[in-house]
Image: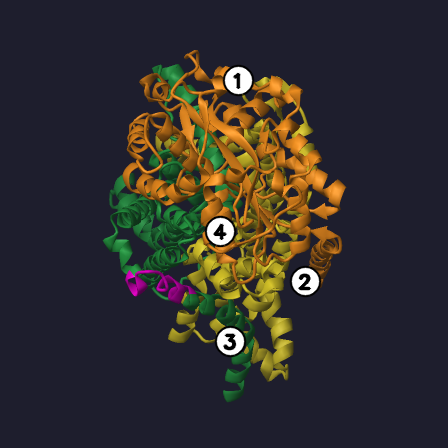
Amino acid sequence: MRRENLTLLSLLLPAGAFFGAFFLLPLARLFLVGASGEGGFAAYATIITDKNHFASLIATLALAAATTATTLIVSGLAGVFLQRNEFPGNAALVAMLTFPLAFPGVVIGFMVIILAGRQGLIGDISLALAGEKVVFAYSMAGLFMGYVYFSIPRTILTVMATAGKLDPRLEEAARTIGASPWRVMIDVIIPGLKPAFISAGAICFATAMGAFGTAFTLATRINVLPMVIYTEFTLQANIAVAAALSFVLGAVTWVVLVAARSAAGGTVAAAG
Amino acid sequence: MRRRGPIFLAQLVFTLFVCAFLVVPVILSMLAGLTVNYFVGIQSGLTLRWVGEVWSGYRDTIFLSIGIALACLACTLVLGVPTAYVLARRQNALARALEELLVMPVAVPGLATALALIVTYGAVGGFRTSWVFILVGHVLFTLPFMVRSVLAVLMAIDLKSLEEGAASLGASFRQRFFHIVLPNCRSGILAGALMVVTLSMGEFNMTWLLHTPFNKTLPVGLADAYASLRLEIASAYTLVFFLVIIPLLVALQVLSQPPRTKSRAKQE
Amino acid sequence: MLKRLVLPIAFCLTILAGDRDASAQGRAICYNCPPEWADWGSQLKAIKSNLGIEMPSDNKNSGQAIAALIAEKANPVADVTYLGGIAADPAKDAGVLAPYMPKGWEKIPADLKDPGGYWFTIHSGTLGLFVNKAALGGKPVPQSWADLLKPEYKGLVGYLDPTSAAVGQLGVMAVNLALGGSYENLDPAIKFFKQLGANQPIVPKQTSYARVISGEIPILLDYDFNAYRGQYTDKAPVQFVIPKEGTVVFPYVMGLVNKGPNAENGRKVLDFVLSDASQVMWGNAYLRPVFADKLSAEAKAKFLPDADYARARPVDLKKLGAAQKAIIERYKNEVN
């Protein structure tokens, strides 16, 4: 047993050393740097005391929450549908939906401009239909659309995998006692998908909280926390404030992830 | 019969709409990279001129990104597979805590991780300016994905009995690891590998701060192109990016298909 | 399976090793040398062919460049930096520049260089309206700052973010001085940008030349040299307008980074940007070279008439540098 423990420990060593040296140590230093500015450790409280920072924290939380909710609904509907129904072209549709997985935020930002920018598709369509050009790429709505855009691929595979494991007998039982398709969905399918929703939702939320590239490209007067951090950094290199804010952002996100995983129970080893 | 009813149709239309939402901008962007003049539109004609300019100006970034992605894969394999094995063998509270810890770089914004690295190792001259600096960030970010992918497969198979069986036949730990464990989590390794490579190729948040003008990766080059070059060039650049990444994504999608065999039963 | 990965990994390592070859020749790193801005692309090529130094382009704006320089102070990555005039003194105060007086230093007018040798002007540009006529959708080309506030231009106006781009800060000061403010009193500018905010402006953080050419941003507060480039080099339907209320001519400076890794090459580059060859190139890129006689008649002919330029005043760099912090703070707090 002892021997085995030693072997296991030695297997963990490379990853442990790497992680310690390149993540834990730097983060600890960052924490100290965050406190090295004029306000000292009070810099960590500015996220609540400073009106702009607080507003951007709330905006980011709201955006991430809205993105997660919308994405889960969309992925849930589309994912369950694709998992359960065999028809020609099914695989192609799945491929199309997981496609944007690797796109950097910059590309997503550009997609948003293509759809909702001044010369965007949506603007053209609305001009033809309603006579007025709808342009929302440079507002919170555009950012929201971009976030949903990159979140759908991240969540849909998880949802589909879990949907594939749902026990069809439960639904059949529900139908035989007369439940309508709507009730079947609410009472059987959605609870069955709960672990997928929680784990995929957590990743979706975390990504949305920390996303930078999209806002950077669309960068207008959108005040999400990663942009505020970046602005502080480029504002005469306010590294202390940038560090403090980054730390808080990371902590908030991590807490949400941990809470979600314990809600889902056990080691939810979901991919993606 | 019930399947093809109005509910099926509604769901199909919805799904098609979502697909269109994701795919149409990509197609438009690819077209923009091939048109002579974006403002005029497709009437101005098609050309490969912009793709050519991207290739001549940004070829290095493409190779560097691919190189870093492959190096990242090598690192996550060496670091991640043994870690997943240990976590699968010891499924206790400590193991869960370790897994939680590993996920931290995904939760902490890329900006923060990059800032932390610069603040700590920025003074180490040679390290700061080399591509290895970028690699470190990428490995931190992608490691949890490899670990979780392999862990999922390992948890689905009865690892303990397999190993005990082999041990009882006289196999050493080394033999067990390489001949029993690895082949059995092959699908997890493959799915994890593709995930790592695609994530590394697209990583921007950290790389934006970690790079130096000599070490631009593809996403950083893309951001530059969108900022200061003609839209057609930036779009052509995006087109090249798609061409590199799509085969990988297709392979990822194929390999992570929901279960047909029991070894992938709980992969996701 | 692992064996199958050996080949691709070896391949990538060879590519990465190939990168090392670049270090054998001369290298230098510049912060804030975007290829399409002021035609740095041609300058970088000229540096390569004339000096044998490989200097890649870099798309940081002035604020990002200074931030990176400060963050890397212990072990700098860059050798030289290019900055908007407004960021020159702040960079010096942050301790990231080292004094160096390149060849030709004496010929630079006193108010366009730092007395201690920390930075010097290489060229200037005039701020105004960079307009894509075709993207206006039939509306008239705006002729004044006040025009931008009209509802007909809703959603059509853009300006670079003053919280990080020098152009943004300079835009604020240009508007300020044109509307009756001073280096100390920023009220007219803040009031203007607040009002502009109601007109749904687009506020990018980095050079947005491409977006004007593509028509995404039809009216951008930007420099004359960018507009002329669009008009004459890229043959786009754009034009430059010097607003009726007036504007300012802004210098752009360069400086040697303190303790840069390739300081010797950095010095050679700085010598080069003041040389005749380089100054003529700046002129051909539609900037006003600091040695004004190097602006060729051909290039000058493409500028707007001198009568228009009479409305553009030179700027007081010292006061401008001192005002930078106030501009950023007030914009951040009152407009953003």
Viewer-side label of 4, 2: 4
Residue A270 at what x, y percent from top left?
A: 44, 58
> In the rendered picture, chain C carries what hue?
orange
- Chain drawn in yellow: B
Residue A124 found in image quarter: top left
Of C125 and B146, the residue lying toward us: C125
Foreground tag (2 vs 3): 2
Tell me if label 4 and label 1 are in contact, CB under 8 Å.
Answer: no
Q: Earlier in the sequence, mark 4 or mark 2?
A: 2
Disc 2 to disc 1, how far (Cα)?
Answer: 72 Å
Q: Which chain is green?
A: A
CA neighbours of label 3 inside 10 A, class few (<14), some (14 to 19), many (20+): few
Q: In the image, which disc is placed on residue C92?
A: 4
Question: Which chain's residue wears label 2?
Answer: C
Report x, y in % for residue A120: 45, 25
Residue range highlighted in magenta: A30-42
In the drawing, what numbered circle is on residue C1? 2
In reply to whether residue A33 is colored magenta, the answer given is yes
